[in-house]
Image: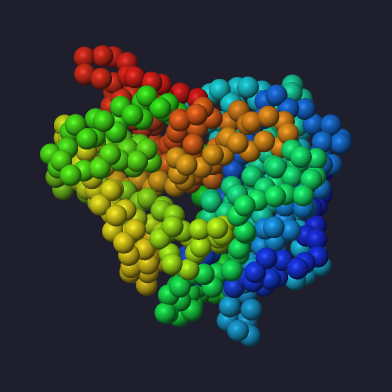
Amino acid sequence: MSGVRIVDMSFAPLLPGPYPPPGEIVPLSFLDMRWIHLQQPVQNLLLYPDSTLSSSSLHLFKTSLTQALSFFHPLAGKLTYRHATDQLVIDSSSPDCGVSVIEAESDLDIHRLINEETIDIIAFTNLVPSFSMDKLPVPVSAIQITKFVGGGVSVGAALHHAVMDGIGFWRFMETWAAICRDNGAPFQSHLQTSHDRDVILHPHKEVIATRFMKLLAPDLPQLPQAPKSLVQDRLRLTRHTFTLDHTAIKFLKQRACTQSDDRTIFVPSASIAIAAHVWVSLAKAKRLPKENDATSLWLLFDLRAYLKGIKNDVLFTGNCIRGVPVKSSGQDLTAPQGLASACLAISHAVKAVKERPLDGVERWPDEFKNRPTGMNVMVAGSARWGVYETDFGWGRPGRVELVSMNFDGEVSMLAGRDKGSVQATVALAGGQMEVFEKAFIAGLAQQGQSDYPGKARL
């Protein structure tokens, strides 16, 4: 055996309802609809180096998945087009609803996969499941569990983004892991889970959803097909993971405030400071000193706290994010005050979204499909996502990564494994990673020092 070998296929069925609102049929909202054109599922990988997988622990892993699906039943459904009503829905009414589970074995060195800062994308891709997304109805999720012959276990998950966003997905993983860790005991939570898209309040939401559907998937039930080059394009990207500890993050925030001429600036959040630092470092790596070298950053921002229809004690699992476009120039980003300039630009854009979270919603698909020319950076995830707490009873994972990074300049951000740290994985094309890394590290170094406070590491 070399690499990863599938040894079995099984199925975690969806138990009979009743299910949380709105029941077994969940119509997509316009916030879901903007993701229907994606041609590959979102794939996440969790590596557990100190785990062993016995037949009993594998059985518990699968039965706890079935239990968790009772709280997150859309994950067991199928994305379906209803011709009679011209609707896209997640349909969990069929008796064959559930989630496929791939059982695999690998002779790869899990410790190497965890400790290498540059991701082995071929190995990581083989450790996560996938599924066809070309023609409806299609399943919306799949799981792969892989046993390493030298010790260790990995859990890979694939998800159609139209079903839920990262917050909903990681809440599902937290629920599933808790049930497994407690040997199948009933899950208790202070949050009520809701999949009901009616909490998204907008006077024209049905019209907007239909427009998105017609624009992004005009040939239903056929979905846009993935170009044959997509996988090859993914393999051409180099991915490097940086983990900034509390000291390094504090230094970035302080440096942004010190550089700023605007004394009204508030201290940027960890997510904004790191996103700005990546943006500045990439501008320097790409040598964008000219004023007319336009550059844009897209920040995927969670709207839950800013929409009136969503209550604080309810976890809404559907898509509830929007892209926040931020524009700048190579001249501004590479100037001595570049970090402060980037932080201010991102902060002002986020502030505007907080005040009017659904402003200009009608234009979102056009903005997302037609990103401006020039250097683009897209930041997904959040420094608050505690993904390293996903313990199935095997201990905390040694590494968690978003595998499905397909674009030059894409950034995935997560809370790091150590308390107060943040993990940022950057994907770049064309041999740019080495020069980017130098700019990234140099931006964390104090004046007159070759190193920087804290550490950017795995």
- Name the residue: 52% across, 69% down: 199
For the rendered model, the colour scheme is rainbow
- Name the residue: 28% across, 21% down: 445
* Residue 436 shows up from this direction: yes
**296 versus 24 height, above or below:** above
Choose between 410 and 208: the one closer to the eye: 208
Q: Based on the displayed image, in which of its 4 quarters is residue 131 positioned?
A: bottom right
For the N terminus, the image quarter is top right
**Where does residue 436 sit, x and y in percent of width and height?**
34, 30
**Relative to 44, is 364 on the left or the right?**
left
Choose between 288 and 392: the one closer to the eye: 392
* Residue 371 shows up from this direction: no
**Where does residue 97 sit, x and y in percent of width and height?**
76, 63
Residue lying farthest to the right in this orientation: 55
- Name the residue: 67% across, 48% down: 175
**250 versus 34 height, above or below:** above
Q: Based on the displayed image, in which of its 4 quarters is residue 249 positioned?
A: top left
**Relative to 281, is 55 on the left or the right?**
right
**Relative to 452, is 141 on the left or the right?**
right
